[in-house]
């Protein structure tokens, strides 16, 4: 392990530049020693909401000039921040977790890099990365897809686009929208394993897994509160048992055998030719 960091000499002022600093996603203990050091030595903190970051700094016993920054910031506001990074050390934080991960900062980091400003990252809490190991879903390959669209058609299109990705999928979700997303998952991917990771690192942390329909039934009965990561296992290696006959029988009620086989193949990852043969058997009794 190399303990040397771009700012490792604690007795010297911080080098000028941009420091991307992750902050906790709930449990205030999840801030790194390095993050506290940079926040205490920087000249300015760029943040989404000055009240939220003000509270964090107060908890850490720090007081720093705060500058509001989000993705709607004007070119002029970003130029002022870039100037500040040329003169001194600017820490970029978001309300919670890792900046730029479904949070502001993308344009600022790009422009800082393009201007030759030193940019350093301080990794730490991130809800997506906290959720995948907890879910028990395959974690060797995963795709983070941010928030699903709120409109039914757009949500379905995004999910269809991701249908054949051979990896676990991670989405950010909110309580009020969770059941709509689970409904869409239950229709499109009835056989894939799903997990709902809620209130990570907080008092009421919970991680529940099952099929989308099982989770939908649960959350219809117990409307979810708090912050949520929604995770879906990969198409083929999902450990949920596939009842191909039941899926085919349901599909055959409205579709021809070839169409039923194609639909079930898409949803389950099973072989379409085998499914077609089985659909013909079921149809002919
Ligand atoms: N940048 C943050 C990160 O690194 O995780 C994410 C910010 S995004 C605006 C907020 C979303 O992250 C929430 O709607 C939720 O989906 C997820 N999230 C944040 N904190 C969470 C927590 N403690 N438990 C579960 N999900 C969380």
Image (cartoon, grey):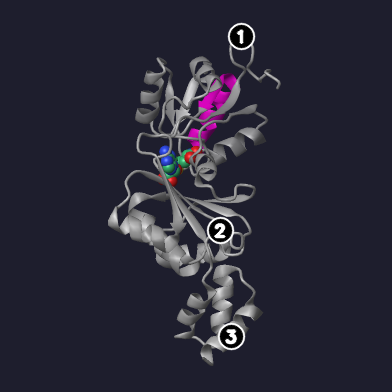
The mark that comes first in sequence, 2 or 3, is: 2
The dot on residue 258 is 3
Q: Which residues are magenta?
A: 73-91
Cα separation, mark 2 vs mark 3, equals 26 Å
Q: Residue at x 68, y 30 (%)?
A: 116
The mark that comes first in sequence, 1 or 3, is: 1
Query: Does 87 appear in magenta?
Result: yes
Q: Residue furthest right?
A: 2
- Residue 54 left/right relative to 113: left
Location of ligand 1 given as a quarter of the image: top left
Q: Which residue is mark 2?
A: 239
The dot on residue 252 is none
Query: Does 150 appear in magenta?
Result: no
Q: Is residue 27 visible?
A: yes
Does the Cβ of the disc 3 residue fall within 8 Å of ligand 1? no
Report helix, strand or loop for mark 2.
Answer: loop
* Along the line of sight, the residue nearer the viewer: 281 or 183: 281
Report helix, strand or loop for mark 3.
Answer: helix
Q: Residue at x 64, y 74 (%)?
A: 271
Q: Residue furthest bottom?
A: 284
1 vs 3, front mark: 3
2 vs 3, front mark: 2
- Residue 112 left/right relative to 103: right
Q: Tell me: residue 173, above or below residue 180.
A: above
Cα separation, mark 2 vs mark 1, equals 54 Å
Q: Which residue is mark 1?
A: 12
Residue 59 percent coordinates (x, y): 38, 20
Q: Residues within 10 Å of mark 3 (few under 14, many from 20)?
A: some
């Amino acid at each position: 392990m190399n303990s040397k960091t771009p700012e490792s000499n604690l007795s010297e002022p911080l080098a000028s530049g941009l420091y991307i600093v992750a902050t906790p996603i709930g449990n205030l203990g999840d801030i790194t020693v390095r993050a506290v050091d940079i926040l205490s030595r920087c000249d300015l903190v760029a943040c989404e909401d000055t009240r939220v970051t003000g509270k964090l700094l107060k908890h850490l016993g720090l007081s720093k000039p705060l500058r509001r920054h989000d993705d709607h910031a004007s070119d002029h506001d970003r130029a002022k921040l870039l100037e500040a990074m040329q003169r001194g050390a600017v820490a970029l934080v978001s309300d919670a977790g890792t900046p730029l991960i479904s949070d502001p900062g993308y344009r600022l980091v790009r422009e800082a890099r393009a201007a030759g400003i030193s940019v350093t990252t301080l990794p730490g809490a991130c809800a997506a990365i906290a959720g995948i190991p907890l879910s028990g879903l395959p974690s060797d390959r995963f795709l983070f897809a941010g928030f699903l669209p709120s409109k039914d058609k757009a949500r379905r299109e995004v999910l269809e686009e991701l249908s054949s990705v051979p990896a676990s999928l991670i989405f950010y979700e909110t309580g009020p929208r969770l059941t709509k997303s689970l409904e869409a998952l239950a229709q499109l991917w009835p056989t894939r394993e799903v997990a709902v990771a809620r209130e990570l690192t907080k008092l009421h942390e919970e991680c529940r897994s099952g099929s989308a329909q099982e989770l939908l039934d649960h959350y219809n009965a117990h409307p979810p509160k708090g912050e949520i990561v929604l995770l879906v296992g990969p198409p083929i290696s999902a450990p949920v048992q596939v009842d191909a006959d039941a899926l085919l029988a349901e599909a055959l009620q409205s579709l021809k055998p070839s169409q039923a086989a194609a639909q079930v193949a898409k949803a389950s990852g099973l072989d379409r030719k085998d499914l077609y043969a089985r659909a013909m058997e079921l149809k002919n009794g």
